[in-house]
Each structure stands twice: as structure tokens, then as C-alpha cells.
Amino acid sequence: MAETMRATVYRGKNDIRLEEVPMPKAGFGEAVVKVTLTTICGTDVHIARNEYPVAEGRIIGHEPVGVIHELGEGVVGYNVGDRVLVGAVTPCGTCFYCQNNQWAQCAGYDNEWKMIGGWRLGNSMDGVQADYFKVPYAQANMAKIPDDLTDEDAVLCADIASTGISGAESANVRIGDVVVVYAQGPIGLCATAGAKLMGASLVIGVDSIPERLEMAKRMGADVVINYKEQDPIAEVMRLTGKRGADVAIEALGTQQTFENCLRSVRPGGTVSSLGVYAGKVEMPVEPYIYGIGDIKVVSTLCPGGKERMRRLMEMVRRDKLPLRQLLTHRFTLDNIIEAYDLFSHQRDGVLKVAISTQEVKPERERTEQVETEEPEDVGLLGIRMTESED
């Protein structure tokens, strides 16, 4: 009888379950990693709501650290037991897109492009919210974790740090630029940090949650704006002498924040879009200056590969990127359904949840969850989350 493991499985709209499933096996060029720590991403919530399509039966999740359990033929320089970080994007390194430094669009060895093909884990193949997961193109994607970094130090490099910082990189933030970041969730906070690291002279963080605005200051924002108390566009114009920001970063994925970015950026500036949009996105004519204002709009999915992961971990090691403070809540894999419910409803000041495959003692007590109007077995703003009876 094949060995089994626990895994978080998407079973259709509003239905994710913790199930027992067969363990993966490593083929040529692959590895199997035993997960020690993972997280829940906002994109996972989009998947659970069927706002981003994946196949029913897919194990979800894409932010893992763990130890190598099995090495497939052709993978060299690693040993079973090595601690590794694997990025959410797992490029092959050899296809047309990889050779043009467009890692997230990787077509794989068959060179057949699929939508955001570089994002495989929890998307086009089984993901990491499980006891074990399979690493594709393992030689290119397993980054050894330095001994002086904990799992919690490293785990957020897999996606949110890489994605958030890439929002500033794609916009080509220059020394002395003014950058405004709309939405200070985990991705936006990392975009804020990325803008500061790239030399922006003024970084403006916009949100409405006081705890997130305070965290934005700790991640590099010079000024924060609560959009429920101030008009963010008017405030950006005031701070820039009515010129507008050089770069506006959208980190939520809504029409309103996208438009706010267009209205906040100067002629010739750049709007960098990081959010995952769940509906139609329209380009309003006037804020876009009728298409002749030299405004650039760029979109980004995080780069991948072990060198990207190594560089981000080095930033954490050198105290340049304080990611661990973004992990506000801790759960075990057995309680991941509860974690989804908390995270998706944004209760108790949550930013990111850490999911351990082992029993862990919380570093702080979680406050009692706020009652909602949904029935007891309903979460994720209407998602029925159940443990499998299989």
C-alpha cells in the first residue's frame, strides 16, 4: 500500500479540505521535500473562491521551506536532509522565456507556454500545503538555507518578498524617486520595502488598517495615508508639489486601487501592478491621459530560481529585509482550515500565518475570533471548509 500524507486540497468553489493523499515520488531532475513550514497566500484564497482557476483535486500552496526527503536522478550537489527554500516560481532555466530572464513565464523543457507557466506549485501541479511536495527542475530551484536563518526567517522569501520587491524592480525605481504603494498587505509591505531598498527618497504607503500602516513605517514607508481619513490622491499631489509620484504600485487587485495609481502618478511615470484581479479591469481614459501621457503600466509575477532565493535570504541575514515580523499568527497543518478562515476574513490584525507540519506552541495568544454572520461550517467569505472524512 502506498504511503500517504496530509494535504490541503481544492475540491471546487468554496470547498477546500484537509485530506489523506498519496505521497509524491521524485522522477528525473526532481526532488521531494518534507515541508517544515509554509504559509497561506492571498492567491490561495482567490483559488478557494474560484476567482483563479485550478483543477479540482489540486493540492494548493506555494510558499515552502523544508528538508530534502528524496532526490531524483540527475540532481547533484544536494543531500537528503538539506534544509531548502523553494520559490513559488520554479523555472526550468533553459526555455525561451527563461533565457530572456522572464522566469515567471517559463514554458518548461517542452517549450510550450501556458499562462504564467513558471508558477507551478499549487497551480499547474500539486502544491506545498502538505507534509511533502515535489520540486520540478530541482537543480534550478532548491536554495540551501544558511544555518543562521530559521524557517520563519526564510519562508516569506518564497513569494511575497520576491513578488513585492519585483514590483519596485519592474518599475525601475531610481535614486530619489517618489513611490506610492496602494494597499499594505503582505505584498504591499514588501513592495514598500523594495522601493526603499532601491533608493526612493519618499515612499508613501496607503491603507485603512492602522496596524498595517504602522507596519508600513517599519518596512520603509516615510509617510502613511489612511484613505478613510484623507484623500490619498490629493495627499500624494500635495507631497509632490502637484506633480505626482514617479511610481505607483498597485498591490491589491481592484479597479479602484488601479485607478488610484493612475491618478497618483505623474505624466511619464510608471504604474506597477502586482495585485491578482478577480474581475474586469478597465483603463479609464482621463487618468491615462488619453493614452498619450507616456504613462507606463507594467505587471509582474515574482522571479524564481535558487539564485533569487539566495539573494533574498542574504538580505534577511544582513538585516536589510525584516520579514519575520510579518508572520503574525501560527497554526499547525491539522488546523489549516481554521487558519484559512482567519486569514481570509482578515481578523485579529493578521498579516501572514505560518503553517507548521509539526506541533508548535504559538508565540503569542490569538485573540478570540470575531463572530460572523456565516454558519459555523462556512468560512472564506462563503467557502465551505471541511476536513475530509476519507
Image (cartoon, rainbow, N blue to C red):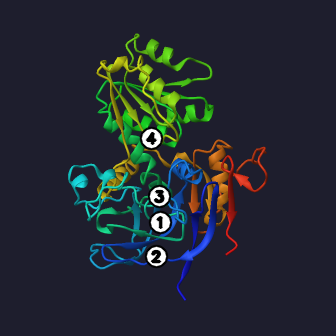
Q: Which residue is mark 1?
A: 126
* Whole-percent x, y for residue 363 in the image: 63, 55
Give the label, 2 or 4, closer to the camera: 2
Let me know if residue 319 appears in the view. Answer: no
At label 2, the amino acid type is Pro
At label 3, the amino acid type is His
* Whole-percent x, y for residue 101 in the image: 24, 49
SS category of the residue bearing label 4: helix
Let me know if residue 35 appears in the view. Answer: yes
Estimate the spatial distance between the alpha carbons at disc 4 and disc 1, rounded to whole Å. Answer: 26 Å
Residue depicted at 42% across the width and 19% down the height: 287
Residue depicted at 62% across the width and 31% down the height: 210
Estimate the spatial distance between the alpha carbons at disc 3 and disc 1, rounded to whole Å. Answer: 9 Å
Tell me which numbered mark, 3 or 1, is placed earlier along the sequence.
Answer: 3
- Quadrant in the picture for residue 350: top right
Q: Which residue is mark 2?
A: 24
State the mark number for residue 190: 4
Figure check: 86 above or below 322:
below
Tell me which numbered mark, 2 or 4, is placed earlier along the sequence.
Answer: 2
SS category of the residue bearing label 1: loop
Estimate the spatial distance between the alpha carbons at disc 3 and disc 2, rounded to whole Å. Answer: 16 Å
Tell me which numbered mark, 2 or 1, is placed earlier along the sequence.
Answer: 2
Image marks 2 and 1: residues in contact by CB distance under 8 Å: yes
Estimate the spatial distance between the alpha carbons at disc 2 and disc 4, rounded to whole Å. Answer: 32 Å
**How dense is the environment of label 1, judged by Cα within 10 Å: few (below 14), some, or many (20 and up)?**
many
At label 4, the amino acid type is Cys
The residue furthest bottom is: 1
* Whole-percent x, y for residue 361 in the image: 65, 62
